[in-house]
């Protein structure tokens, strides 16, 4: 499980160390210790040029492995527009489809669900279900309807705390649910990992709402966002995301 | 037309057999009466000299170790019903001809099964699995098929002309004509049905009477046959009793699987499905815990039935050991397969929504899934309600002000504190006609932590100072 964390990216690089960027064919500067360690013979030019080319070709072949994601290349992620220009720009196109997005909230009521409404409306228009697994409060139908969501596609599922993650996993995996929203304050890495895999299998948008304190825990989610109160709406900060720069943020204006 | 006729020569005996028997033990079934007469006997008894029709006392004299039991008409009828259900797979018109014959018209379904040979192979396999002795015949008329089944088992003749030729060779004793008629005809020197067919019709009618003549016409297909139409029972009941109580509910899955697979087989035979049924778990004293099982759409797939029933069994199973498991279904609607795309793009492992909903309901309970709908009411507490899934909702109201994502089921008193009004007031006044009169001024407020909430104060109260009277009703999440 940890393998793909290390090949993907490190969410919080230790201070003073370089991110694990591989130097070849990236076009980036190569001043880091990683570059010096991995390719000394090539850069010294001691080996014949043909040999170096052969090695480069071999490495390039190796790097085409689908399990390896390189930071310099844009991630091939199917993104769904969020409906907010600033958020689309921040997320590199939108919510990642077939992946789990973790929304870490400073408090409830910061507009965290409103961020999803345009994407949910799009889901419902495509005829896929929107599932709310054990929401903390009853959703208010007029708010969803005013956002353009076809309420016939909205399903609320009552699940006991022991069944919440099972239910979310089933819904994500089934492939008939466009978006699955779940509230899992105490989920551990293993549970989230299962949800992430289920979202990949079902090609669904998976959203998990958790308290901001959970940001310290490791997470397999493809996208982690911290949501804090801003002056005029929620302030969204990327904690990690494929192809995204950690720590970038955007402040959104919601119409409330 | 091609009728397949199945004759069960030992029905009275086989209907009483509940398990494998030692064939060397002479067994017979007798009809009670004065004298009691043998109805059927197994091979060992026949070898010892027991004959059907013999008085029971003579049979006992012929075979000292004869195990004779009285016939059970109810068991015979049940067995014949089961055979009719089996035949129902192969043709739409099934008839039960008492006491021991089932016939089915298969001419219409020959193409479906790939011809008589393929159909016959399946029918034979199905009949062999029942453990009953049987004889099969097929002919253009049910009466002729019946004669073939009795006299020349295995004979199948689809052409009417050839069937008549074969009938002509049948001795009168096997023709199913009344015994007195047969005796009279024998006295006239007639031996086979062919001899009768050659006689002038008027003379024959005078000798054997109009009923027997009509029978001969039906035999040859000269007049249409009227057959009683059998239709399958509208309900299904099955019970499995255990010798010892089963306390471990995981172990109940095995009898459950057997019940449901048998049930699914019957459903397929009948082209039916089931939407609700009951599982009864009986304890030692026969007291049953009933688990109702209800699906959103009728199901007939055994694996789906098992998965959904099993999850409910795990949720509701009683604490005491189970001594019998019974399945009871009253309503078996016609199976209607769900429409599917010709080019099915779903990946393996994907479920469609009905299947997913069934799986969730099976584990979480029948009332775990809710749809959401707007209600045309201005009062927020009544503007939104939970409905059954897939209920269409009235269109969205056009409201001037935003609405919160969460609406608290009960407004909470809002303490005076560090919050400020962002938007408002929006007066919502409604319900004077139904006793739920409300006059409220709603505000969008922001707490000191930056959360946005929907709060109200009863109209007429001053909005400031923010004293008592303020309530929190929703969150703009």
Image: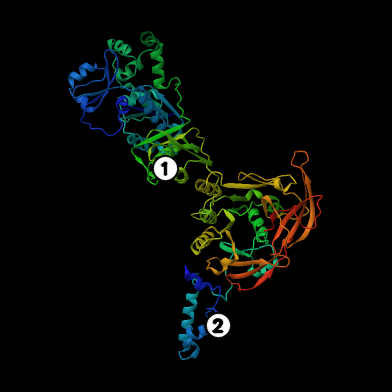
Q: How is the image coloured?
A: rainbow
Q: Nearer the viewer, residue B474 or B391?
A: B474
Question: Who is closer to the viewer here, A125 or A19?
Answer: A19
State which chain disc 2 sits on. A
Mark 1 chain? B
For residue B378, side relative to residue B228 (left or right): right
Residue highlighted by disc 2: A16
- Image spot of residue A112 (x, y percent): 65, 61
- Asked if residue B3 can be seen in this view, the reply is no
- Residue B363 visible in image: yes
Image height check: is B457 above or below B165? below
Q: Residue at x 64, y 73 (%)?
A: A248
Marks 2 and 1, how far apart at CA: 62 Å
Quadrant including the C terminus of chain B: bottom right
At 48% from the left and 79% from the top, the residue drawn is A59
Which residue is at a point 32% across and 16% down the rendered structure image? B195
Residue to which mark 1 is pinned: B319
Answer left or right for A114 relative to B95.
right
Taking depth in this image into account, of A136 and B38 the one nearest to the observer is: A136
User: Residue A87 in the image: x percent, y percent?
Assistant: 67, 67
| Residue B117: x %, y % from top left | 37, 37
Q: Position of residue B85 (x, y in %)?
A: 42, 31
* Co-location on one chain, circles 2 and 1: no
Residue B43, by quadrant, is top left
Considering the numbered disc 1 on the image, is that residue within a helix, a strand or a loop? loop
Image position of B270 with respect to B216: above or below: below
Front residue of this view, candidates A59 and B449: B449
């Amino acid at each position: 499980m940890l393998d793909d964390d290390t090949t993907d990216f490190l969410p919080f690089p230790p201070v003073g160390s370089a991110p694990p960027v591989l130097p070849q064919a990236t076009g980036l500067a190569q001043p880091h210790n990683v570059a010096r360690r991995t390719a000394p013979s090539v850069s010294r030019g001691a080996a014949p040029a043909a040999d170096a080319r052969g090695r480069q070709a071999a490495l390039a072949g190796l790097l085409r492995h689908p399990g390896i994601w390189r930071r310099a290349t844009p991630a091939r992620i199917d993104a769904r527009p969020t409906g907010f220009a600033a958020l689309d720009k921040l997320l590199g196109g939108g919510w990642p489809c077939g992946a789990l997005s973790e929304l870490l909230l400073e408090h409830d009521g910061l507009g965290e669900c409103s961020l999803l409404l345009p994407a949910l409306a799009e889901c419902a228009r495509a005829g896929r279900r929107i599932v709310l697994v054990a929401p903390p409060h009853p959703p208010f139908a007029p708010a969803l309807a005013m956002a353009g969501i076809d309420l016939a596609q909205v399903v609320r599922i009552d699940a006991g705390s022991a069944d919440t993650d099972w239910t979310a996993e089933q819904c994500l995996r089934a492939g008939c649910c466009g978006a699955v929203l779940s509230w899992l304050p105490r989920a551990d890495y293993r549970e989230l990992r299962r949800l992430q895999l289920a979202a990949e299998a079902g090609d669904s948008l998976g959203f998990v709402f958790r308290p901001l304190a959970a940001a310290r825990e490791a997470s397999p989610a493809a996208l982690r966002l911290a949501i804090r109160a801003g002056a005029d709406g929620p302030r969204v900060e990327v904690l990690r995301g494929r192809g995204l720069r950690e720590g970038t943020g955007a402040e959104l204006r919601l119409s409330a | 037309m091609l009728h397949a006729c199945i004759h069960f020569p030992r029905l009275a005996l086989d209907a009483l057999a509940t398990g494998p028997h030692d064939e060397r033990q002479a067994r017979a079934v007798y009809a009670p009466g004065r004298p009691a007469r043998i109805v059927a006997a197994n091979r060992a008894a026949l070898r010892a000299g027991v004959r059907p029709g013999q008085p029971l006392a003579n049979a006992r004299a012929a075979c000292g170790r004869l195990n004779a039991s009285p016939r059970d008409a109810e068991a015979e009828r049940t067995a014949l019903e089961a055979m009719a259900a089996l035949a129902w797979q192969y043709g739409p018109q099934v008839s039960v001809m008492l006491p021991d014959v089932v016939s089915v018209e298969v001419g219409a379904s020959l193409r479906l099964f790939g011809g008589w040979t393929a159909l016959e192979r399946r029918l034979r396999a199905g009949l062999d699995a029942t453990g009953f002795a049987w004889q099969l015949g097929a002919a253009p008329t049910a009466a002729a098929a019946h004669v073939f089944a009795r006299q020349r088992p295995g004979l199948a003749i689809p052409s009417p002309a050839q069937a008549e030729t074969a009938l002509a060779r049948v001795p009168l004793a096997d023709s199913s004509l009344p015994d007195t008629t047969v005796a009279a005809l024998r006295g006239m020197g007639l031996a086979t049905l062919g001899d009768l067919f050659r006689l002038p019709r008027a003379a024959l009618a005078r000798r054997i009477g109009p009923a027997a003549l009509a029978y001969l016409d039906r035999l040859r297909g000269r007049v249409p046959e009227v057959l009683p139409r059998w239709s399958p029972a509208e309900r299904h009941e099955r019970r499995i009793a255990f010798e010892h109580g089963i306390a471990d509910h995981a172990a109940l899955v095995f009898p459950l699987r057997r019940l449901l697979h048998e049930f699914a087989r019957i459903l397929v035979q009948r082209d039916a499905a089931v939407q609700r049924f009951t599982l009864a778990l009986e304890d030692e004293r026969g007291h049953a815990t009933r688990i109702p099982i209800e699906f959103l759409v009728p199901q007939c797939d055994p694996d789906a039935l098992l998965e959904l029933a099993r999850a409910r069994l795990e949720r509701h199973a009683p604490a005491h050991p189970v001594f019998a498991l019974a399945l009871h279904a009253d309503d078996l609607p016609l199976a209607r397969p769900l429409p599917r795309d010709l080019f099915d793009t779903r990946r393996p492992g994907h479920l469609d929504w009905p299947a997913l909903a069934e799986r969730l309901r099976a584990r979480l309970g029948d009332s775990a899934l809710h749809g959401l709908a707007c209600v045309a009411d201005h009062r927020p507490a009544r503007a939104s309600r939970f409905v059954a899934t897939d209920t269409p909702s009235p269109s969205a109201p056009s409201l001037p002000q935003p609405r919160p994502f969460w609406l608290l089921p009960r407004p909470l008193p809002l303490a005076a504190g560090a919050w400020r009004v962002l938007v408002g007031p929006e007066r919502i006044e409604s319900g004077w006609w139904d006793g739920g009169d409300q006059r409220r001024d709603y505000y969008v407020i922001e707490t000191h932590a930056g959360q946005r909430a929907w709060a109200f104060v009863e109209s007429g109260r001053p909005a400031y100072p923010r004293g008592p009277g303020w309530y929190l009703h929703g969150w703009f999440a």
